[in-house]
Image: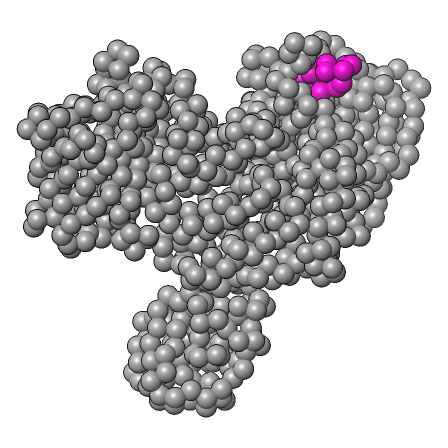
Amino acid sequence: MTGDRISYQFDTEHLQIRINRLGEIVGLSDRNDYTDYLAPDRAVPLLQIAVDGTLLSPIGSAYDSKHKQITLHFTQGMMATVTIWEQPSHLAFELTAFEGRQPTHVIWGPYPTTINGIIGETVGVVRNDRFAFGIQALNIHTIGGFPIEFPSTGPENDAATRIDGGSELRAYSMETNGGINHSRIALFGCPMADALQTLGQIEIAENLPHPMLDGEWCKTARTSRTSYLITAFGENTVDEAVRYTRMAGFTYFYHEDPFGTWGHFGLKTTDFPHGDAGLKSCVDEADKAGLRVGIHTLSNFMTTNDAYVTPVPDPRLMQSGDSLLTNAVDAKATEIPIASRSPFLDRGTLSAVLIENELIRYRAVSEEAPWLLLGCRRGAFNTSASSHASGTKIGKLIDHPYRVLFPDLSMQDEMADRLVELFNGTGLRQISFDGLEGCALTGHGMYAYNRFVSRIYNAWTPEVLNDASRLTHYLWHIHTRMNWGEPWGKAIREGQIELRLKNQDYFKRNLFPRMFGWFQVRLASGSLEATSLDDMEWVLSKCAGYDSGFALSSSLEALRKNGQAEVILGTVKEWEQARLEHAFTPDQIERLQDPTLDFHLEADGKNRWQLYPVTYSQVHIYREVTLQPGEPGEAEWTFHNPYEDQPFQFILRALPDTVTLNDDVVINPVFEVNFTEITLPIRLSPFEYLVCEGDGVCKIFDINWNPVRSLEFSGEWPQIVHEDNQILFWFGAPSSCRVEVRFKTNGPGESVITPNV
């Protein structure tokens, strides 16, 4: 081809792209049916550049067919050479030369399409019911998204975004983030069902990260969706962690907080008195049991007790701004004179500044000149207070509410190298890059995210399963999964449930393995009850419905002292085996996803289970009150049973009176169910549970579900009928306690069978 042709045509197996003489894309066509998915009347530049804050489009182009290069001409004599590679799966475009003034940004697209079905904003793939079109950044300094400095459609860091009537795909590079030369992207199109497979082909062809787990690409490997145990173990307790992990049927367990300092990542001496060697001994012990060990990190967050900070602070600690001392100060001065107040107005959390080898914390900045830092604490974080000459630089350190500091890019590289050393030296196999957003505080945005994780990934020797607090377009290739959703301070059914469900759709549209977040096996604390089997089966049923893994977070103490912990772990094992073996039917999967429904799973032989729908009533509360003579004092409740008639089941919890807070007891509680009355001859102390499962045996548990005693009822046991049931309740002897009561019924069992068994 020559430059006087109307357009240049480039083909993959399924996609054809046409570029005209102005350097604009004028066609994005499915080669199978010739549908053009470029937005109508929207010829768009293959590449834009930014100079002096203005975006420029090419004004002409020429094509060299021998070298497969398009030269894009811009005003002021600037020229960009883009080299093109035609692959069966994709077209690769790389900026291989630039002449003239160097732009601050180069921008691929944005490329508008008529595809408006599924928008994978992070992965950069858009789909309708027939075709998928996508963009891929092919190195760490090519960023999926659109630079924040310029107006755009959709969020800055989204590689794909929805627009009126369709979608838009975009990527860019910046001169400050690794340069603009060799900015490189792939564009691809394929049948909708082949999108994930095509991404894998692009990874291999372009030498992108293509992580494997147990011999399979991590985006399709079942290992990617496995659940795991999170607990704080050490050299002396790793055997317990191994035992509980095996009980749950997990392959991985993971230390939630292994480091005494962040920065140099020194291990806690309480858990690992022998340091890295001690952690390696734990990994080796787990390996003997066929298990793998992981750890939690806060990425580039840096604690103030780390050697990068104290006793001599590293000059590479990241600063948000600086000024100069206007006068000399001695080692005792509590007011520091500064030339400019603006860098110090945002005190942050730590309110820390760096002067030479001293860290200082300040209370406020003076309101009027001469500008002063007021209320200064000298020699902060065990640095040494010293004198400083007039004109000395003073810098405001960037911090975070976790009371941490941050590195510049070169120190961040060192932190990454330390994690590589730890993993390669100990054999660790799992990590979470939590706090990854801290990388942006180096001043290099998404590039810093990509650089930190890629540096570690490229140097690892074992296969490492990993997730993070943030997923970027490029890091889609490295991260195994994202496990978002936290359990802290909430009942198990209330902890970020809307977010967890929303995440499942996010993972689906971004062609990413699903995870359901963290859940706790806890002891009772404050207003929170100890974790029960009923609540954990609710979690497990949702995970089965979405085919999502999860993290089971617990202390070793809670696993020892929660009376249902071992039953919970055994039940986890059954649910996880059935989920990972695709044993649930499509109809069951649809119902398991419903957050309002409960289920119970029981083993029914090898690779077989029975799935029972379960209905719970609302929580009913009863407190004895004094009424006028002759007025009944019992509670009256209605319970709707959607299933067949069955024996009466309930869970009753005794609570102290909220006013007197005495230690009164519940004596001889009485139920009348559809006119059948039972009096249970028991004494129930505050925070004890009474559980009757329809077999006439009433079991009493303590506050943490440990068995206390049981009794067998010898009289006629009530029946719950189909549809509405009238239930009365009162105390058989006066008590100031309150009780919470839930009723329960089970539906008929359904077979769950591993396919091809």
Q: Is residue 754 left or right of residue 18?
A: right
Give the residue at x 17% y 29%.
65
Q: Within the image, what quadrant is residue 137 found in? A: top left
Q: Is residue 267 above or below residue 570?
A: below
Q: Is residue 20 left or right of residue 521?
A: left
Residue 184 appears in view: yes
Q: Which quadrant is home to the N terminus?
A: top left
Q: Magenta region's main secondary structure?
A: strand
Q: Nearer the viewer, residue 696 or 242?
A: 242
User: Which residues make up the magenta segment?
Assistant: 600-614
Q: Is residue 470 left or right of residue 643?
A: left
Q: Within the image, what quadrant is residue 533 found in? A: top right
Give the residue at x 26% y 47%.
181
Which x, y percent locates residue 352?
Answer: 46, 72
Q: Which quadrant is home to the C terminus?
A: top right
Which x, y percent locates residue 172?
Answer: 28, 43
Indicate whether residue 611 is drawn in magenta: yes
